[in-house]
Image: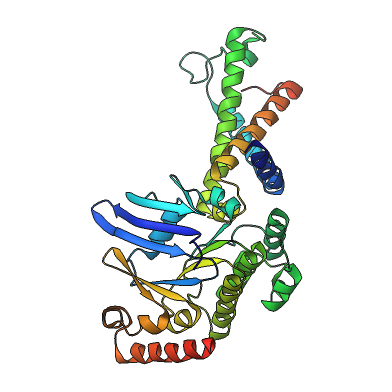
């Protein structure tokens, strides 16, 4: 059973590769949208983005900063996974992929992972703020 | 006769208060084409969507290759040999026809790719995007995917809808070819002449249930079927034509 699943997953690589490209494009769009929202939001008291995150207070390495960063990665990744799944569903492209053996849940999980890895890399390389 | 590859047994389905299917049963047997006929809205497409997990049945049993499928999902059944041709939307998105064919051929080790492409006159269409295809071209491309996939079972929802006669004949020939290769097919539609000519057996969906009418020659002798579905002097004569063409094909 495990061998069969591995074989199926391996055979689905070309489809998953196309998902990876789309997930990365969606990731960039989500990231830019979030940066725009954060940039245009008021800071300080009453702000929906209080100055308590790792990037704005410099509490790098602290528990609060870590939790914020992880939450941000998870949210962005889930948004990308959801957008890709929505795109597949709205365009009805999921029927073709399902005929190939790739389900919508596979697409969601894969896109989420790609976005999470991309976000972690981007954060560690460029110190982009949430 | 060999064991059915796909069995939908006593399927029931309601959408809100509207009961579409009360107890519908249909089989796909290897090497045979089953025409699933019935009026618009009688539940033919719903039955297919239940088989692939797009809708959940209220009750009933689904078996694929002898195994009970508790929660059918197309991507799982596809690996086991099912191919689903929806009414529309198998070839959509930003990939060309050639890319779709390559994907199927790579995934399932497709055979006879060039032969299928040539036979279905797809050579000039390989670089085209889905929105650049006519209905007939799109259907031919979709049937090419099925032929290259060589599935064990295929559900084709209205594969002949809106097609010119030559395209319809190409599609019907492709369906027969799949059956000749051992595939069990269930095909829906309203193109009575071509469908009766193509099918080995007819299942009539009416009032939420199914009636297995047997071979097309017997189906068109069923008074209720003729009166309530075929109806009218014009269609009745069409069905007689179908009997003649079916008989001639078999002879």
In depth, the one of A97 and A128 nearer the eye is A97
In depth, the one of A43 and A125 nearer the eye is A125
Q: From the viewer's perspective, is residue B34 above or below residue A87? A: below
Q: Is A87 placed left or right of A8 in the picture? A: left
Residue drawn at the location 34% of the way across and 55% of the way down: B11
Q: From the viewer's perspective, is residue A51 above or below residue A119? A: above
Residue A76 image offset from top left, x and y in percent: 58, 30
Residue drawn at the location 26% of the way across and 66% of the way down: B207
In depth, the one of B166 and A77 nearer the eye is B166
Q: Is B44 placed left or right of A10 in the picture? A: left
Q: Residue furthest left?
A: B17
Q: Can residue A38 be spotted in the picture?
A: no
Residue B233 image offset from top left, x and y in percent: 31, 92
Q: Is B224 placed left or right of A8 in the picture? A: left
Q: Residue furthest front?
A: B1
Q: Is B60 placed left or right of B34 in the picture? A: left
Residue A65 image offset from top left, x and y in percent: 61, 12
Residue drawn at the location 58% of the way across and 26% of the way down: A74
């Amino acid at each position: 059973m495990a061998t069969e699943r591995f074989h199926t997953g391996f055979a689905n690589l070309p489809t998953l590769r196309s998902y990876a490209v789309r997930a990365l494009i969606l990731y960039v769009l989500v990231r830019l949208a979030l940066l725009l929202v954060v940039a245009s939001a008021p800071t300080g008291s009453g702000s929906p983005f209080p100055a308590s995150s790792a990037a704005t207070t410099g509490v790098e390495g602290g528990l609060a900063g870590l939790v914020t960063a992880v939450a941000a990665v998870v949210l962005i990744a889930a948004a990308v996974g959801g957008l890709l799944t929505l795109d597949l569903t709205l365009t009805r492209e999921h029927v073709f992929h399902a005929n190939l053996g790739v389900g919508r849940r596979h697409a969601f999980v894969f896109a989420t992972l790609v976005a999470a890895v991309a976000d972690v890399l981007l954060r560690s390389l460029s110190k982009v703020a949430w | 006769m060999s064991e059915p590859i796909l069995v939908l047994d006593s399927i029931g389905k309601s959408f809100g208060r509207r009961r579409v299917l009360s107890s519908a049963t249909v089989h796909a047997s290897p090497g045979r084409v089953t025409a699933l006929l019935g009026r618009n809205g009688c539940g033919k497409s719903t039955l297919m969507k239940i088989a692939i997990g797009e809708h959940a049945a209220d009750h009933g049993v689904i078996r694929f290759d002898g195994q009970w499928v508790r929660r059918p999902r197309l991507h799982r059944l596809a690996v086991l040999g099912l191919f689903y041709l929806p009414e529309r939307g198998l070839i959509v998105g930003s990939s060309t026809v050639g890319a779709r064919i390559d994907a199927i051929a790579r995934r399932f080790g497709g055979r006879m790719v060039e032969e299928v492409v040539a036979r279905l006159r797809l050579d000039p269409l390989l670089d085209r995007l889905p929105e650049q295809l006519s209905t007939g071209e799109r259907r031919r491309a979709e049937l090419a995917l099925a032929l290259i996939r060589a599935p064990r079972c295929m559900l084709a929802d209205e594969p002949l809808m809106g097609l010119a006669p030559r395209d319809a004949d190409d599609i019907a020939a492709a369906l027969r070819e799949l059956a000749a290769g051992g595939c069990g097919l269930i095909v829906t539609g309203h193109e009575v002449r071509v469908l009766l000519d193509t099918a080995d057996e007819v299942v009539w969906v009416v009032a939420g249930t199914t009636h297995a009418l047997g071979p097309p020659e017997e189906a068109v002798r069923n008074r209720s079927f003729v009166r309530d579905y075929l109806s009218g002097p014009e269609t009745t004569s069409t069905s007689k034509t179908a009997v003649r063409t079916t008989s001639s094909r078999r002879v």
